[in-house]
Amino acid sequence: MTDIILDIDHQQSSHCESGVISTLLRSKGLKISEPMAFGLSSALTFVYLPMVKIGGLPLIAYRMPPKAIIKAVCKKLKVELDSQNFSNQAKGMQALDDELAKGNLVGLQTSVYWLPYFPEDMRFHFNAHNLVVYGKTAAGNYLISDPVFEHLVECPAEDLQRARFAKGALAAKGRMYVVRNVPSDIDLTPHIYSAINKTAKMMNGLLLPFFGNKGIKFLAKKIRSLVKTKPKYQKLFLGNIVRMQEEIGTGGAGFRFMFASFLAESAKLTNNDDLQAAAKQATEVGDNWREFAMDAVLFCKKRKDLSLDNVADKLESCATQEQALRSTLLAIKG
Amino acid sequence: MNDKDVPQDDSTTYQGQKKLIYAVDDSGNYHGVKSSGWEVESFATQMAVDDLQEQTQDALIQARQGEVSPLAYHMLRLRFDISSLSQTTGFFQWQIKRHLTPKVFNKLSESKLNTYGEVMKLTIAELISLPK
């Protein structure tokens, strides 16, 4: 067997899913930037699920659940995406090889933990990491464009198989996807406005207290109640929020910045200055989230005279800001 | 965030990797900027890693003293917990809790040990032993 190396235009991304779909569409001649993919899919949100525990600490997410971005982008833009799961691991690996042999870039859903090229401290059992395979060496290693990495990487077949078929929450079940067809002419304008409207509507939360602004305030309330717990748990709890926000994937602030970038790109596309102003506002929201992370860590370090109430206040100010951003977004008319 | 403010703190947790963050330049244009780390984030990561390492070390000591089974040590070392191990092996959480005691673990059937081995990428010999 000889090496298979397909053409790939690897561009580092902020988030795996939006990065993968941007790469796959670009390879078919459809230029959709990462922020555009993220914005069009209305993926920006906030979720705090106290009953879902990971390593004993609650789940906090800053975007829609995995698969939502790829699904929404393909549906809106009428992109033909061929997606498959496999119950048989050997068949799943064979199908990947077959697609590569046909000259197709292949998207995969994988577990971060079993990908050997990830830094040790960032490996954890998270099953919904997306990447693109662009080839295979004669020795049997897969050539990978992992969107969150600066450079192209390589992964032994055994590890990739393990990563594709790891069981557990959000199990990938060998999920693999290939873009078959993209439409030649797309007018993004109506999609941009409808996506912004949907994002804004979600920001107020649903009936339950776990989502959007309500979710942020709910988490702030929980932080205030930590006074009754041991200092060690307080630190782990706040550290967990920061990790979920900054380290894991793109993070809460990162998603706000990406959304701002989407708004700015949209402003240029549609010649709408209101969008540019909204972009600035979204950036300020992201900045405030980062200040919150800083405060949370300062509390953990016991620097300054920060109390849990101060940290919770800061988080509540994020909710207030997002509420204001919501009104701005709702007022934007195409 | 202004592109000049994107932190470049060379965090050890990144191991030389960089992350992309969208930032804005002075004329209001957004673009991706590579960050070599942020001190605030790496502190949180390090805190979590340290906590996990502490738990793992405690489990190792307890396993050596025969208070818990080697599974307790390997589980934490490989960043599993009872809930994620239950999801991946298909065992119930109460079963895994029993398997964490040496008395039950020492009598586990080969097929059960194999299930753990497969999920944790360990041979049975590795699973039932502890580091020297």
Image (cartoon, coloured by chain):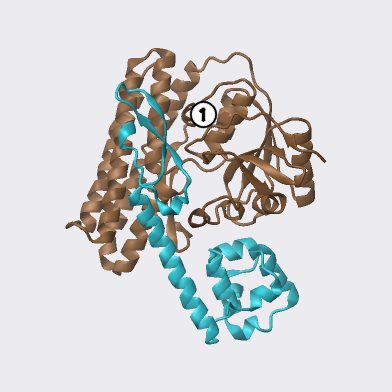
Chain colours: A brown, B cyan
State the residue at coordinates (60%, 53%).
A116
x, y (%) of residue A112? 57, 51
Residue A21 quadrant: top right
The N terminus of chain A sits in image quarter = top right
| In the depicted structure, whether residue B44 falls above or below residue A180 | below
Residue A168 quadrant: bottom right
Residue of label 1: A37
Q: Nearer the viewer, residue B40 or A61?
A: B40
Q: Residues within 10 Å of mark 1 (few under 14, many from 20)?
A: many
Q: Nearer the viewer, residue A116 or A60?
A: A116
State the residue at coordinates (47%, 59%).
A53
User: Could you say whether the residue bearing mark 1 is in a helix, strand or loop?
Assistant: helix
Does residue A328 appear in this view?
A: no
Say what amino acid the circle numbered 1 marks.
Ala
x, y (%) of residue A216? 33, 46
In the displayed orientation, state which residue is furthest to the left. Answer: A305
Chain letter of the residue carrying label 1: A
| In the depicted structure, whether residue A226 falls above or below residue A70 | below
